[in-house]
Amino acid sequence: MRQHLLAPSLLAADFSRLADEINMVNQSEADWFHLDVMDGRFVPNITFGMFITEAINKLATKPLDVHLMIVEPEKYIESFRRAGADIITVHYEACTHLHRTLQLIKLTGAKAGVALNPHTPVSLLEDCLEEIDLVCLMSVNPGFGGQKFIPQTYDKIRKLRQLIAKHSADIQIEIDGGVGLDNLEQLIYAGADVLVAGSSVFGANSPIERIAALKQTGIQ
Ligand code: DX5
Ligand code: ZN
């Protein structure tokens, strides 16, 4: 099996000790920071925006994977790029002109990602695969950490793998929501490249050891 990437989601971190949590991820085997931006409109929860993203960027030594769960994301692409985002992911369901928004992300120099809610089929991406660097399959309904993984995701990963192969596209598949030691191996086996983990990492007694375990699982 190939080596997968691990992106701890800071949503589950203790924000009263944010600098310590960021340093822990810096020192760990994790690959990216996953940042969940929520606006209280696209999802029924509010987190943080570019101001906190910029503060995180000052301490983080690994790429920032910014997941925008907001309406009209095109208005804020440049601000998040300036704040330090390396990968900017917008929701398919929040973009009327997805193709144009993906081009805008690329123009800023960031990698362009598209997230799909659990009810959105992967086939809807077929006509803009060339503009996409990463597809984030939501394996929970977005808005909150600590939810139960939706098993239908395995099937979506396999379908997306086929679509990518058919078009010889260069796209990473990321899985977000309910990822942990119990399902990570199966997700990699189905074709996932990047695993986001929030509560599994920050809810562990030793988050740095949990990250190491999540990196080891699935390697043969
Ligand atoms: C959910 C977020 C996820 C979340 C994952 O809306 O996009 O990134 O933080 O958290 P866990 O790993 O706890 O499901
Ligand atoms: Zn996320």
Image (tube, grey):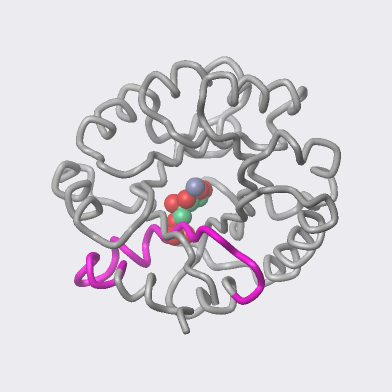
Q: Quadrant of residue 35?
A: top left
Q: Find residue 34 and report its horizontal and vertical position in percent.
A: 41, 46
Residue lying at 79% horizontally and 36% vertically, measured from the top left: 128
| Total labels drawn | 0
Q: Is residue 100 visible?
A: yes
Is residue 83 or residue 69 the one in the foreground? 83
Residue lying at 74% horizontally and 28% vertically, measured from the top left: 98
Q: Residue furthest bottom?
A: 220
Q: Is residue 6 above or below residue 86?
A: below
Q: Is residue 180 above or below residue 107?
A: below
Which quarter of the rendered picture does the N terminus lie within? Answer: bottom right
Q: Find residue 69 and report its horizontal and vertical position in percent.
A: 55, 36
Residue lying at 84% horizontally and 44% vertically, measured from the top left: 126
Q: Is residue 64 above or below residue 166?
A: above
Q: Is residue 144 visible?
A: no
Q: Is residue 44 left or right of residue 17?
A: right
Q: Which residues are magenta?
A: 189-211
Q: Is residue 197 left or right of residue 99?
A: left
Is residue 88 or residue 140 the one in the foreground? 88
Q: Quadrant of residue 6?
A: bottom left
Residue lying at 68% horizontally and 47% vertically, measured from the top left: 116
In magenta segment, residue 199: yes
Q: Find residue 186 and report its horizontal and vertical position in percent.
A: 58, 78
Is residue 149 or residue 31 the one in the foreground? 31
In magenta segment, residue 197: yes
